[in-house]
Amino acid sequence: MILNHVRALLGPEAIRGTGSQNQPLVAPADDAAVALLLRTASAEGWQVGLVGAGRWCPSDCPADLLLTTRQLDRVPHVSPADLVTTVEAGTSWTQLRSVLADRGVWVASDHPGPDRTVGSVVATGTSGPLAAGFGRLRDHVLGITFVSGEGRIVRAGGTVVKNVAGYDLTKLAIGSFGAFGVVTSVTLRLRAVPRADTTLVAVGKRDDLIDTALAVSDAGLTPSALELFNAETQPPGTWTLAARLTGRDAAVLAASDTIRQVTSIDWAELASSNAAELWSGLHQGAVSAPTTLRLGVLPTAIEPCLDLVQHYLREGTTGVSMPLGVVRWCGHASADDVRRLRYAAAQQEMPLTLERASWALRSAVGHFGAYREGTGRLIAELRRAFDPRGVLVVPLGSDA
């Protein structure tokens, strides 16, 4: 019945197979089609699961139908002169980078997970190592279009670097995991492609490298990325600190020399191909196991945070964006593992976000888990404002 109804609404080309529970997998062609689908779902009482392009979280959500952004894969506007681009949510970052590179510009933002879509990264609020030097994802998003659970098209923010005044709904949509609506397009800030791109690496004990990273920050240096990580191929107890420097040739060379002067460890400069492999490997590592999560922590409290992660989650790969205090972990974890870590981290004011997991784990613990006093009620009211019939199936937390 639902399949025939959707086919009549959007045409047979919108049906792209079925989900893991044999629900229709629906791919609207534009935001008007997304709005029509969600208005109908609201009127009919259908539950809609959001799967994006299916490259990040598994498509195992229990719902009456699954909405994919696979057909929203265009880059309708690029303005190198104004340093902005508008891109549809189903466009992969690989595709976007290719389009922008031809114009000599880029979005100075990366993220865990290879070849994810723009919508996926915006929905999860994911920032990668480059956030250390260029800001978090929200600093690159100028405007956003999303469709609410009741089928309203909401256009928020602006289309130029000098943004519009008023309440910025873009901040509400970024990192909401689709709880308030389906992101259909995003306007992003661009930068000129840097002339120089150098990566320095140092290998050693974890705590020694943390001290080294803090010394770099204390010296007033701001690398484009300053990432601490443990690789599966490294001996136990051995970590790597990678500093990425981008910009003009002279500035990058000066920063490289200064880093060597203010630290007491040996740095090696990677060839460009090896550097690309290193950063690509870090992005791919986020999908090497079924669960990915992140914690926020003050840079001075990274050591106790990593100790908590090691104690409660044990096996897995870990990366730390040192200047920002963002800890990312990927591995195998049960609901009890995540609950215990979340509770212990909360005692030290370290919020934990479950970015990627099976539906069983996401529904058991929620993306955000318990909120501070009063916040859960506010989130619930916002969800009712944008999705009064509860059409969108998104497990934020037990008290939302």
Image (spheres, rainbow, N blue to C red):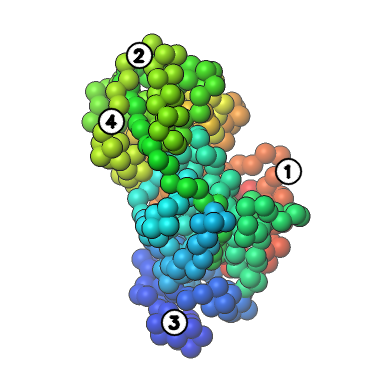
3D distance between C-alphas at marks 3 and 2: 62 Å
Residue hosting label 3: 3
Q: Earlier in the sequence, mark 3 or mark 4?
A: 3
Which mark's residue is nearer the viewer, 2 or 4? Answer: 4
Which mark's residue is nearer the viewer, 2 or 1? Answer: 2
144, 260: nearer the viewer? 260
Residue 370 visible in this rendered orientation of the protein? yes
110, 106: nearer the viewer? 106
3D distance between C-alphas at marks 2 and 4: 16 Å
Which mark's residue is nearer the viewer, 3 or 2? Answer: 2
Residue hosting label 4: 270
Residue hosting label 2: 265
For residue 371, what is the image quadrant? Answer: top right
Residue 178 located left or right of residue 22: right
**Residue extending farthest front:** 250
Q: Amino acid at mark 3?
A: Leu
Which mark's residue is nearer the viewer, 1 or 4? Answer: 4
For residue 44, what is the image quadrant? Answer: bottom right
Circle 4 packing at 10 Å, graded few (<14), some (14-19), many (20+), is some
Circle 3 packing at 10 Å, graded few (<14), some (14-19), many (20+), is some
3D distance between C-alphas at marks 2 and 1: 47 Å
**Residue extending farthest top:** 264
218, 375: nearer the viewer? 218
Q: Residue shown at 50%/62% (left/top)?
A: 78
Residue hosting label 1: 374
Q: Position of residue 379 (x, y in %)?
A: 67, 52
Q: Position of residue 209 (x, y in %)?
A: 40, 19
3D distance between C-alphas at marks 1 and 4: 49 Å
